[in-house]
Image (spheres, grey):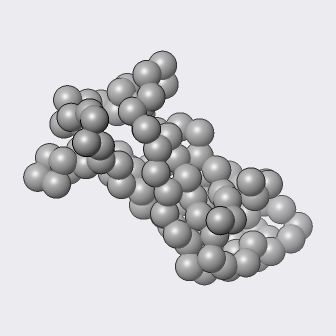
């Protein structure tokens, strides 16, 4: 896990045509060190904003390095063969983290 990252989720919506949940926002490097690319933002998707029932998770690759104090944008998509995500238009996104793979 990459330490000292702060995340903002500023957009969530159900893409009904593609049957997927979409979350996007920004991530900021608050550490005194740099983050080298590639790295990944990972998030967990929940049935609602309470975060009590997890639908699953996904990640997206970030192709730019971040110096201390810099931010970048991210978007993560979630779909499932086990769950009809269109039943959860008020879904929640939590447990964001940055990782190297």
Residue at (80%, 74%) from the top-left corner?
Answer: 34
Q: Nearer the viewer, residue 46 or 5?
A: 46
Q: Is residue 13 visible?
A: no
Q: Nearer the viewer, residue 82 or 58?
A: 82
Residue at (74%, 54%) from the top-left corner?
Answer: 1
Residue 5 x, y percent position in the rendering: 72, 55
Vertical placement of residue 5 versus 69, above or below: above
Q: Is residue 9 left or right of residue 35?
A: left
Residue 30 x, y percent position in the rendering: 78, 60
Residue at (56%, 79%) from the top-left corner?
Answer: 63
Residue 40 x, y percent position in the rendering: 59, 64
Vertical placement of residue 41 versus 72, above or below: above
Q: Is residue 59 left or right of residue 83?
A: right
Vertical placement of residue 20 versus 39, above or below: above
- Tell how many labels: 0
Position of the C terminus, as image quadrant, is bottom right
Q: Is residue 33 visible?
A: yes
| Residue 92: quarter of image | top left
The extreme front residue here reads 82
Residue 67 x, y percent position in the rendering: 76, 76
The extreme right residue here reads 32
Q: Is residue 30 left or right of residue 66?
A: right
Residue at (55%, 72%) from the top-left corner?
Answer: 62
The extreme left residue here reads 17
């Amino acid at each position: 896990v990459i330490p000292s990252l702060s995340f903002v989720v500023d957009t969530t919506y159900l893409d009904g045509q593609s049957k997927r949940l979409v979350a996007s926002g920004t991530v900021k490097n608050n550490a005194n060190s740099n983050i080298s690319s590639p790295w990944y933002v990972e998030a967990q998707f929940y049935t609602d904003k309470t975060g009590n029932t997890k639908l699953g998770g996904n990640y997206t690759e970030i192709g730019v390095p971040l110096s201390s104090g810099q931010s970048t944008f991210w978007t993560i998509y979630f779909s499932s063969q086990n769950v009809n995500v269109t039943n959860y238009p008020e879904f929640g996104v939590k447990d964001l983290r940055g990782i190297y793979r």
